[in-house]
């Protein structure tokens, strides 16, 4: 089954890395096909940034995201630019403290930035918290696959912090949806 996942937030939140890790989890550890794309430009620091992943059980013939079924939104500007028009059939995970509006589609509020800052002491792992939530909320890849992909992708010496962030995200993603 084809899934199109769109990540958005502001530059510096690890939006592109999140999509890379999710694609890696699918392709290398869950025996699925995956293609990741991203937007480069003035978004690099501060503006709305976007990255996307297509994950499918079959070979991917068209690599671009046309109609995302999963949105991961980590800033208000990202919501306005990429998430506001999400169709009712989509699922959205949004950072509950940084996104002020709520979509018309199904959604889950994930306090990723607050959890990273308050519980883990490092706001820089908010994207990893959100990835954990995405996995448990959607089942798009297995926990084992995302764990291995995170370990493959984070800087040496930060593995324990990132795994703690991922596990906290798993817990947050299991909570009831709206």
Image (cartoon, grey):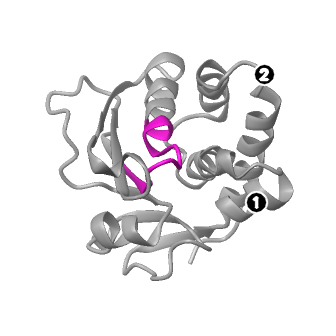
| Numbered disc in front, either 1 or 2 | 2
Residue bearing mark 1: 115
**Residue 8 painted magenta:** yes
**Which residue is painted at 43% across and 30% down in the image?**
23
* Magenta-tinted stretch: 5-19
Q: Where is residue 9 shown, x and y percent of the image? A: 44, 58
Judge from the rendering whether residue 101 lies leftward or rightward of residue 65; answer left or right.
Answer: right
Nearer to us in this view, 123 or 91: 123
Residue at the spot 53% in from the left edge and 36% down from the top edge: 141
Residue 100's spot in the image, x, y percent? 50, 81
Circle 2: element type: loop
Check the image and report above or below for 64 versus 75: above
Q: In the visual, does 33 lie left or right of 119?
A: left
How dense is the environment of label 1, judged by Cα within 10 Å: few (below 14), some, or many (20 and up)?
many
Q: Residue at x 72, y 64 (%)?
A: 114
Q: Is residue 20 magenta?
A: no
The answer to whether the residue labelled 1 contacts the one labelled 2, judged by CB atoms less than 8 Å apart, is no
Return the mark for residue 165.
none
Image quadrant for the C terminus?
Answer: bottom right
Quarter residue 118 falls in: bottom right
Q: Quadrant of the N terminus?
A: top left
The residue that disc 2 covers is 157
Please, which residue is most extreme toward the left here? 62
| The one of 76 and 152 positioned closer to us in this rendering | 76
Identify the residue at horizontal 37%, vertical 81% (top origin): 104
Q: Is residue 103 left or right of residue 128?
A: left
> Is 63 situated left or right of 174 in this image?
left
Residue 5 visible at all: no
Residue closer to the observer: 155 or 73: 155
Q: Position of residue 14 (x, y in %)?
A: 52, 43
Classify mark 1: helix, strand or loop: helix
């Amino acid at each position: 089954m084809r899934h199109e996942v769109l990540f958005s937030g502001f530059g510096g939140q690890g939006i592109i890395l999140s999509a890379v890790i999710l694609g890696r989890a699918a392709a290398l550890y869950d025996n699925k096909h995956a293609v990741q794309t991203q937007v480069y430009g003035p978004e690099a620091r501060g503006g709305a940034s976007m990255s996307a992943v297509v994950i499918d059980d079959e070979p991917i013939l068209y690599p671009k995201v046309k109609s995302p079924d999963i949105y991961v939104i980590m800033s208000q500007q990202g919501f306005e630019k990429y998430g506001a028009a999400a169709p009712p059939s989509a699922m959205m995970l949004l950072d509950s403290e940084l996104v002020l509006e709520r979509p018309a589609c199904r959604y889950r509020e994930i306090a990723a930035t607050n959890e990273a800052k308050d519980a883990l002491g490092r706001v820089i792992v908010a994207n990893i918290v959100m990835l954990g939530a995405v996995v448990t909320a959607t089942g798009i890849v297995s926990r084992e696959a995302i764990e291995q992909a995170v370990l493959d992708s984070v800087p040496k010496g930060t593995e324990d912090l990132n795994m703690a962030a991922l596990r906290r995200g798993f817990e947050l993603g299991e909570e009831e949806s709206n």
